[in-house]
Amino acid sequence: MNMHENARMTVHGRVLLVNRIVAGGWRVADAARAAGISERTAYKWLARFRAGGERMLHDRSSAPGRMPHATPVATVEAVEGLRRRRLSGPAIARELGLPRSTVGAIL
């Protein structure tokens, strides 16, 4: 998984952090300071490690688990069908009675 551009630590850095605390006997505050992160974040990674081992230190998906307000499939198919007939976005919006922003997001 690609590292988030604002992430301070890689998986390797998280493993090093946890090893310093668990095996090295470092205080969480000292390990956090050495890693350049907050104590709260260090405690978060330590808790994840204790919950499931090293595999829990890997990046997780940030994709939503569900989308309760997603555009219905039938609407998406209708928009795509009209687009294949070469209608413009605003024309499709008028035809289907949808907001232009919804049609634009689909296209």
Image (cartoon, helix red, strand yellow):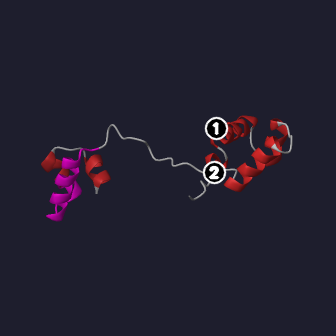
Magenta span includes 68: no
Q: Residue at x 20, y 48 (%)?
A: 75
* Residue nearest the observer in this picture, 38 or 98: 38
Magenta span includes 76: yes
Relative horizontal placement of residue 14, taking residue 72 as reference (left or right): right
* Residue nearest the observer in this picture, 16 or 8: 16
> Looking at the picture, how far across and down is residue 84, in whole percent?
17, 64
Please say if the residues under marks 1 and 2 sit with CB atoms less than 8 Å apart. no
Cα distance between the residues tagged 1 and 2: 25 Å
* Residue nearest the observer in this picture, 11 or 7: 11
What is the total number of numbered labels drawn onto the structure image?
A: 2
Relative horizontal placement of residue 79, taking residue 45 as reference (left or right): left
From the viewer's perspective, is residue 84 above or below residue 23? below
Q: Amino acid at mark 2?
A: Asn
Q: Which residues are magenta?
A: 71-91
**Which image quadrant is residue 65 in?**
top left
Residue to which mark 1 is pinned? 51
- Give the structural element (helix, strand or loop) at label 1: helix
Q: Residue at x 59, y 53 (%)?
A: 4
Q: Amino acid at mark 1?
A: Ala
Q: Residues within 10 Å of mark 2 (few under 14, many from 20)?
A: few
Q: Residue at x 16, y 61 (%)?
A: 87
- Give the structural element (helix, strand or loop) at label 2: loop
Rendered-image quadrant of the N terminus = bottom right
Residue to which mark 2 is pinned? 6
Q: Is residue 10 visible?
A: no
From the viewer's perspective, is residue 50 above or below residue 2? above
